[in-house]
Amino acid sequence: MPATLVATHAPTPVLVEDLSNMERAVALYASDMPDRYRLQGPVDTTLIGWIGQGAARLGREEVRRRASFLLGHRRLWLRDLTTPEINRRHKQRFPSARRLNVAESMASTSLFWVSVAPGARELSAAIDGTCPKCDGTGKLWVNLVIDDVSGWFEEGYAPCWVCRDGGAA
Ligand SMILES: [Zn+2]
């Protein structure tokens, strides 16, 4: 798949291949893509264009920020850990659940046409509010496995796996 440069209005053009799956969903949400969009053809260049459009509208850093919050919200939601505060901010950012759904599924599909560049930075999760897992401390008291074979472990603090996943800062 050739490199696809689509964003021309951003101060720094955003390459679609530098955007992770979730960042593409955020970009699509912010683009002109209709809520009821259906894919056109085996490689939908219009859709790729919308990813670039949305990314250009928000700017590279904002796309990443929103995607990190989206990932954080997803992690909490999957474990039924979301709080009213976190849910409210999520809804402010993505008022339409239906549109977000479409954007996420289209973003996943786009990975078949434009894969994520090997050098693209990994997305880390962020919680928009107090993390309900660690109470905002960023660490959890856990059993740290020292030796798998003997089953030896010690207790200690580890980074909270919900809000501190060791990705890029
Ligand atoms: Zn946490």
Image: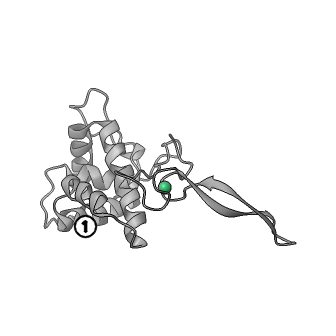
Label 1's element?
helix
Where is residue 113? Give x, y as percent. Answer: 37, 57
- Number of numbered markers: 1
State the residue at coordinates (49%, 59%): 162
Q: Amino acid at mark 1?
A: Asn
Q: Mark 1 — residue?
A: 101
Q: Which residue does the image show at 15% across and 65% down from the upper left?
A: 37
Image check: 80 left or right of 34? right
Residue 131, above or below 150:
above
Q: Is residue 169 left or right of residue 35?
A: right
Q: Splitting the image into 4 quarters, where does residue 43 fall? A: bottom left
Residue 10: image location, x then y, percent: 24, 31
Is the CB–ligand 1 distance for label 1 below 8 Å?
A: no
- Percent x, y for residue 65? 35, 44
Q: Is residue 38 visible?
A: no
10 vs 142, left or right, is left
Q: Is residue 145 visible?
A: yes
